[in-house]
Amino acid sequence: MKKFISIAIIILFSFLAYSQEKEEVESESSHCYFKKNSISIGLAVPYSFELNAVGINARVYYNIGEAICFGPEFSYFNNGNEEVMDVNFVGHYIFETPWVGIFPLVGVNYTVEKGEHHNQEAIGVVFGAGVHRNFGKVAFFGEYAHVESDLRDDFITVGLFYNIR
């Protein structure tokens, strides 16, 4: 577990260092960047492979630069037998392509799982990758994420972002 956390921290700080060197891009016309020092809110539909259930996800990101953002996410799942709540704090670094922005994601995860005969919670790391495309202040995104902890899981998430500032 310490190995995964160390790798996640190294990757995140590498993205931060690289973003400081990156030339600023005019985000108003960009298909994959949001304006520097802005805030984006998002709603999404995640699918949990472990629970075989669809949930709801909300997130708020601070766009520290055009290419890097970070913030909290909350997901809720209920498959009739179990109720799961995931809280993540993740960072993304966006790589621009001619069609979409591609991003790795890395962060920390806290999961609470409640069932009829058990209650569990775990802290771990979350990592994965995704793509998004901006249309003005709105962005469509899709991502894959893996949670590595005592309550490990894999997720596919699709949703929308809105840049509010």
Image (cartoon, rainbow, N blue to C red):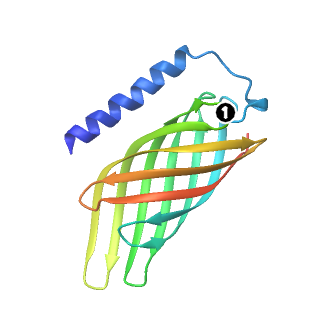
At 26% from the left and 41% from the top, the residue drawn is 4
Q: Quadrant of residue 40?
A: top right
Q: Nearer the viewer, residue 92 or 70?
A: 92
Number of numbered discs overlaid on the protein picture = 1
Q: Judge the density around disc 1: few (<14), some (14-19), many (≥20) Cα neighbours within 10 Å.
A: many
* x and y, in percent, of residue 50 in the image: 35, 68
Q: Is residue 28 left or right of residue 18?
A: right
Q: Secondary structure at mark 1?
A: loop
> Tag 1: residue type?
Tyr
Residue of label 1: 33
On screen, residue 42 above or below 93: below
Q: Is residue 124 left or right of residue 45?
A: left
Rendered-image quadrant of the C terminus: top right
* x and y, in percent, of residue 114 in the image: 33, 76
* x and y, in percent, of residue 45 in the image: 57, 64
At 78% from the left and 31% from the top, the residue drawn is 28
